[in-house]
Each structure stands twice: as structure tokens, then as C-alpha cells.
Amino acid sequence: MKTKIAIVVPAAGVGSRMQAGIPKQYIELCGKPVLRHTLDKLAQLLVVDKFIVAVSASDEYFQESYLPDARFVRCDGGKERADSVLNALQVLQDFSPEWVLVHDAARPLVALTDIEKLIRECIENGEGGILASQVKDTIKRGDTYAEETVPRSALWQAYTPQMFRYQELKSALQTALQNGVTITDEASAMELQGHPVRLVAARSDNIKITTPEDLPLAEFIIQQQEKSHV
Ligand code: CTP
Ligand code: MG
């Protein structure tokens, strides 16, 4: 029997660091909202059976037509990102996929080839994993002054998608939220439970649209990707 795979897309944030007046997932890049870029890209993954898009209950910008096909379902988001993800995982309860990937709506530039690599490596090894890239800059610890240069050889930037077994991720997130632990990505909840998290090397242009200077950069990357069919 085919392995059941679902993708959860948290898209219920307000985008406070973008200061755009509208949530950043609705800002247009090359004439199309960020959220549509993300969903249209994910829709090309034919191996995925179901997609849950978490949108704020008070969202005035979302349109049903943004959902690319019948595999996509909208659900309500929550207060924090982890609440949005957990809501979406609850919606998947009856479908009960073996694996689930979580991918930020705010990362429209992810390469399909990298997602396919993540899916392949996780299933082959029977372990969860995340897209990530090795830190390129020299890293300092400090406040006003640099106190220390941190060796970067073992440092990775964590991206999404992050892929885990559905039941394990759901219970890890539930436990973390019950314990009041701040969870910024799924991997941290899994690490706390002692689950392995594979680091799958990915293209470093999988940026999260966060601040205004990301917008022209993202448009440039989209144009480059259209040329090279990433
Ligand atoms: N997100 C969500 N529910 C929340 C908060 C965030 O679904 N309560 C989503 C965002 O829509 C985004 C992803 O999680 O796709 C990553 O979060 P982030 O980049 O922090 O987005 P925002 O929280 O919207 O931005 P900011 O932190 O600047 O307010
Ligand atoms: Mg946020």
C-alpha cells in the first residue's frame, strides 16, 4: 500500500516584522500573493495526498480559489505558530497519514527537488528530518560587544519543510505546549522527546519572507527559478 503523506501549511501569522499593513502571506511577488506561490509549488508534489492550510479565523484576505486542487483543505490557525500547526494536525486525525510535512506559507522559494530529497531520505531511513543549510557567516555571541566567535562547522540554519511521523509529531507538540515550552519549529518539539532529526542539506535561497528587504530579493529568486525550472 502507498505511504500516506500530508502537508500542513501554517499561514495564520500577522507578519508584524514586515510592517506591511496586511499579513505578509498576501503580499504580491511578481504579481501573485506569497501564499499562492507556496501552495502552487506544493501542489506539484503528486506523492502528497492531503494539504491542510491553517488560516486565521479573522483573516479577511484568504480566498478559496487560492487552494490549487481538491487535496487542499483550510482550517483555523491558532495564537502561535505551534498552535496553528497542532490545529491542522487535529484536522488530519481521521485521514491519519503516516508522515506529515510542515511548511511555512512564508517560504515560497523552496525548491521542489529539495522537498523530494527530504521525503526520500526520511522514508528510506525511517526517521524524521528537516531541510537546513550550513551556516556561511562567522558567528559571534554577544550583546554590544562580541564575547566569543562560535565555531560554525556544526551550525545549521533550520528551514521548512520539516517531516515527521504524524502521530509522533502530534504528541511531541501536544507535550511541549502542555509544558509551556516555546516551540519555534517542529524539530525542537521532536528533539525534546529524544526523536532523531536528520539535517537534509538544502539550497540556501529557501528564505522565509520576514522583513521588507526580503521582497525584492524574493522576486529576483523567483525570476531566476522560472528560468532554471527549480
Ligand atoms: N504562523 C501561523 N500562526 C501563527 C503565527 C505564524 O500559522 N499564530 C505562520 C506564518 O503565517 C508563517 C509561519 O507560521 O507562514 C512562520 O512564521 P513567521 O515567519 O514568524 O510569520 P509571522 O508570525 O506572520 O511574522 P512575525 O513573526 O513577523 O509577526
Ligand atoms: Mg512569527
Image (spheres, rainbow, N blue to C red):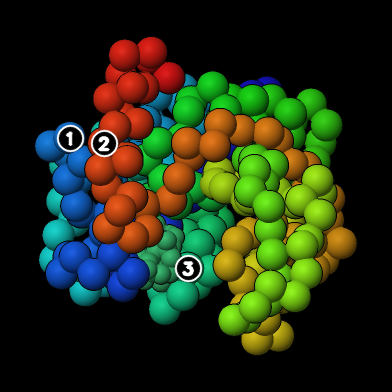
Residue behind label 2 places its C-beta within 8 angstroms of ligand 1: no
Q: Quadrant of ligand 2?
A: bottom left
Q: Mark 2: give few (<14), some (14-19) or many (20+) Cα within 10 Å.
A: some
The amino acid type of the residue labelled 3 equals Arg
Q: CA distance from mark 2 to mark 3?
A: 25 Å
Indicate the position of residue 28 as horizontal and vertical percent values.
17, 45
Specify which label sits upstream in the sequence, 2 or 3. Answer: 3
Q: Is residue 43 visible?
A: yes
Q: Mark 3: give few (<14), some (14-19) or many (20+) Cα within 10 Å.
A: many
Left or right: residue 57 compared with residue 173: left
Task: Give me the residue at 17% from left, 35% from top.
Answer: 30
Task: Give me the residue at 48% from left, 28% from top.
Answer: 111
Number of marks: 3
Q: Is residue 52 visible?
A: no
Q: Please identify, in this view, whether the residue under mark 2 or under mark 3 is nearer the observer.
A: 2
The residue that label 3 is drawn on is 81
Residue behind label 3 places its C-beta within 8 angstroms of ligand 1: yes
- Is there a contact, CB below 8 Å, between mark 1 and mark 2? yes
Q: CA distance from mark 1 to mark 2?
A: 6 Å
The residue lying furthest to the top in this view is 228
Left or right: residue 143 compared with residue 95: right
Question: Is 35 drawn above or below residue 77 in the view shown?
Answer: above
Indicate the position of residue 83 as horizontal and vertical percent values.
50, 72
The residue that label 1 is drawn on is 30
Question: Is 24 drawn above or below residue 43 in the view shown?
Answer: below
- Is there a contact, CB below 8 Å, between mark 3 and mark 1? no
Task: Give me the residue at 81% from left, 54% from top.
Answer: 151
**Residue 219: mark:** 2
Specify which label sits upstream in the sequence, 1 or 2. Answer: 1
Q: Nearer the viewer, residue 67 or 162?
A: 162
Q: Please identify, in this view, whether the residue under mark 3 or under mark 1 is nearer the observer.
A: 1
